[in-house]
Amino acid sequence: MRFGYCQRFIFDGRLIFGPDAWSLIITISLVVIPVVIFCVFVARHLLHKFPTYNAGYAILVVAIAFTIYVLVLQMLTSARDPGIIPRASHPPEEEFSYDASTRIDSSGRHTPSLQFPRTKEVMVNGMPVKVKYCDTCMLYRPPRCSHCSICNNCVERFDHHCPWVGQCIGLRNYRYFFLFVSSSALLCIYVFAMCALYIKFLMDGDYPTVWKAMKHSPASVVLMIYCFVSLWFVGGLTGFHLYLISTNQTTYENFRYRTDRRRNVYDRGCLNNFMEVFCTKVKPSRNDFRAFVQEEAPKPSPIARPAEPEDDFGTYHRSKVEDDLDIGGDLLKISQRRSIQEFDEEIDRRNDGGRPGNVSESEVVSELDRQVPSTGTEIPITRTDARNSSWGRRSSNWDISPEIFTKNTSVAGSGSLMTEKERLVGERK
C-alpha cells in the first residue's frame, strides 16, 4: 500500500486529516464563538419570553444541538478518507511499448525509446471517456478521478480541496461536506432570526426605537452582521452544490469543462442524481491505514551486459553491422569463386581450341578486370623472369611487391580483405 506522505493520522490511523488540518481550528472557532455569544447575550434573555411550555428554552437547546450537528459533519468531512487511490509500486508493464525509431544516447549508441501512452479510453454508460496516466501514483486514474496537488494523492470523484476543512472532497466525504455547508447556512439563518426577534422584543418594551434597541444589545447587532456576511458565503456555496448535484457534476469538472460544451455522460436525471449522492452506501476505503507496512519484494534487475570495447576512433561497437558485413562477404566470396571457375574453364577451352599457349600479361589483367569486380584496392604487380607454367606453355612470372604486404597488413588490421585480383594472381603463381 502506498499513499502520499502529506496526511496527518490520529488514533492509529482511525482519523486521517489533510496537510492543512490546522485550518480546522479557524473553522471551528468561526462556528463556536458566535454561537457562544448568542447563547450568553441573546438566547439567555429569550428563555422567559415564551412562558407557555417554557418554549424559550427550546431556542437555547436548538442552537446548541444545531452547533454540535455542524461540528460533527465537519469532522466527518475532514477526518475520513475522501477516496484516496493507493499508489502502484511500478507502472503497468502491459502498457509498455518501444518506439521503432531509435534515439542516439550520449555515447552515440542507437537505442529504442520506451513509449508509454499518456491516455486511454474506457466506456462509461456506453460512452468513451479518456482517462489519464498519473506519473506520481503510477496508475491510470479511474473516471472522474484527479490528483490533488496539496494532498499529493489521486482521489476518486475529486471535487476540490477545501481549505476550510483541511481535506480533499471526494467520493467518500462529499455527502458530509454538502450537509456541513448547508447546515452552516441554516445555522446562520437561525441565529440571525433569533437576534432580530430579540431586537423586536426590546422595541416592544422599554426601547421603542430601533437605534435604542440596538444600542441596548450590541451583541445582537454584531451577530446579525456576521450571519448576514457568512450567509453569502455558505448560502451561495449551498446553492452552487445543489446545482452540481442535480446535474451530476463536480466542482473540478464544472470549472474545467464548462467551455467544452461536452455531453455529461454521468447525468442520470435530477432525481437519480440526488439519490446517488444521498441514498447510496458509502464505498469502503481502498486503504487500510492501520495495517503494518510490508516491504515489497524487489523486482529482478535486468542482466547487466559487459561493457563493449570501443575502437580506436571512439565509436560504439557495431556488432550487428559487422555480422551483416560478414554475411555479405561470404556471398561475395561465393560469387567470386564461381567467377574463378568460369575463368579456368575459359582458359582450358582456349588451350584445347589450338590457341597459342603463351598468354600475355595484358590478356590476364583484362580478363580479371572483366570477370572479377574491383573491390577498391589496387595491387601493384611486378614482372620477373619467365618460367614454364603448369599449363605447358611459356608464361610470365608475376610476383607481389613487398609494399603490398605492408598494405595488406594495414588493411587486415582494420577488418578488410585482400582484393580478388591479388588472390587470383597469387594462385596463378
Image (cartoon, grey):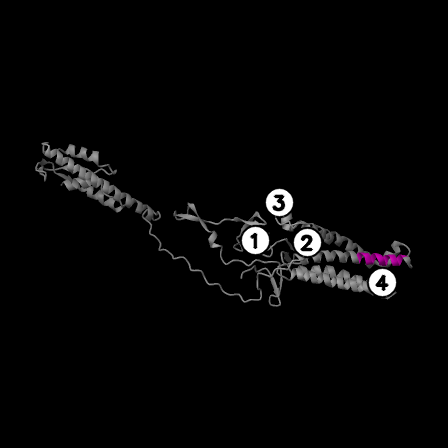
* Magenta residues (range): 191-203
Q: Amino acid at mark 1?
A: Pro
Using the rendered image of the protein, determine whether residue 105 is visible from the camera's viewpoint: no
User: CB of mark 3 within 8 Å of CB of mark 4?
Assistant: no
Q: Amino acid at mark 3?
A: Arg
Name the residue beneath numbered marker 2.
274
Q: Position of residue 259 (x, y in %)?
A: 63, 43
Left or right: residue 312 versus residue 57 is left
Left or right: residue 371 versus residue 1 is left
SS for dot 2: helix
SS for dot 3: loop
Left or right: residue 372 versus residue 42 is left
Name the residue beneath numbered marker 4.
46
The crowd level at tag 3 (other Cα within 10 Å; few <14, some 14-19, many 20+) is: few
346 shown above or below 113: above
User: CB of mark 1 within 8 Å of CB of mark 3?
Assistant: no
Alpha carbons under labels 1 and 4: distance apart: 54 Å
